[in-house]
Image (cartoon, rainbow, N blue to C red):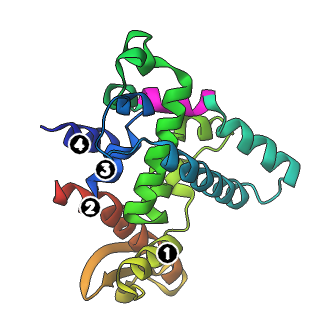
Amino acid sequence: MSFVENAQQTLQYVFTQPRLLEEALTHKSHLQGKTDESLKDNERLEFLGDAVLDLIISEYLAYTFPEWTEGDLSKTRANLVRQSSLAQAARRLQLGEFLRLGKGEEQTQGRGKSSLLANALEAVIAAIYLDGGLVPARVFVLQALEDHLKELGQPHLVLDRLDYKSQLQEWSQQQFSITPEYCLISESGPDHRKVFEVEVSIQGAIQGRGIGYNKKSAEQEAAKQAYTQVCHGNSEEKS
């Protein structure tokens, strides 16, 4: 298995443009002495990834804690995106194993340096964003920082707090310029306790099915199943 394939398996995301992943994992020290102008280090992606990370975390906090003040949100975001938090997340992902470093950084244990790991994680976030858009970048960030987000006192998994219908619609519009279609498949039970079953399709292909005590909750469950499929299942199929 190649370097890129191993990294993709660890990150649980398959790139359509693998060169972005290579760039994200290349420290500037790796390019010293090399004359190939097509090779790039990860500083450009690190810059973009910092902005994408701020957006995703800001969005998550604002949605999850609507009662918080701007000060509370800003302070929490700063703690989540600081170098130590990102480095911890990078270590859990074993990102250091995939860094391409120069001899000097190798000799000084660069693979374990918090600064290099945090920067690489931001670069990977940018690479995923450029390759697949905001939806897969959001999934990656929230999963990478899930342990830190759980410490905020929320009882549910991070991804369970997302509005799946909105996320699925955003993905579908980015990929195909169309919106998902929801179809009521069945309706059963007494009037005071009806059960609804809904399917959601994209481009005529059924992507998810959900059941709920009202159409809205059934559609949300169907969207959740489809959202998980398009962000994870499709990547697995590519591999």
Query: In the image, is 152 to the left or to the right of 48?
Result: right
Q: Earlier in the sequence, mark 4 or mark 1?
A: 4
Mark 2 belongs to which amino acid? Thr
Identify the mark nearer the N-term, 4 or 3.
4
* Marker disc for residue 4: 4
The kind of residue tagged 1 is Lys
Residues tagged 4 and 3 counted as in contact (Cβ below 8 A): no
Q: Is residue 91 rendered magenta in the image?
A: yes
Residue at numbered disc 1 = 165
Which element carries disc 2, helix, strand or loop? Answer: loop
The x and y percentages for residue 178 are: 40, 89
Label 3, label 2: how far apart the Cα atoms are: 19 Å
Q: Is residue 205 left or right of residue 119?
A: left
Q: Are marks 2 and 1 in contact (CB under 8 Å)?
A: no
Residue under the point 86% across and 54% down: 70
Name the quarter where the N terminus is drawn.
top left
- Closest to the camera, between mark 2 and mark 1, is 2
19, 64: nearer the viewer: 19
Query: Which amino acid does the dot numbered 3 rest on?
Result: Ser
Q: Nearer the viewer, mark 4 or mark 1?
A: 4
Q: For the residues marked 3 and 1, what is the alpha-carbon distance in whole angstroms?
A: 41 Å
> Vertical placement of 170 versus 183: above or below?
above
Residue furthest to the top: 107
Mark 2 lies on residue: 16
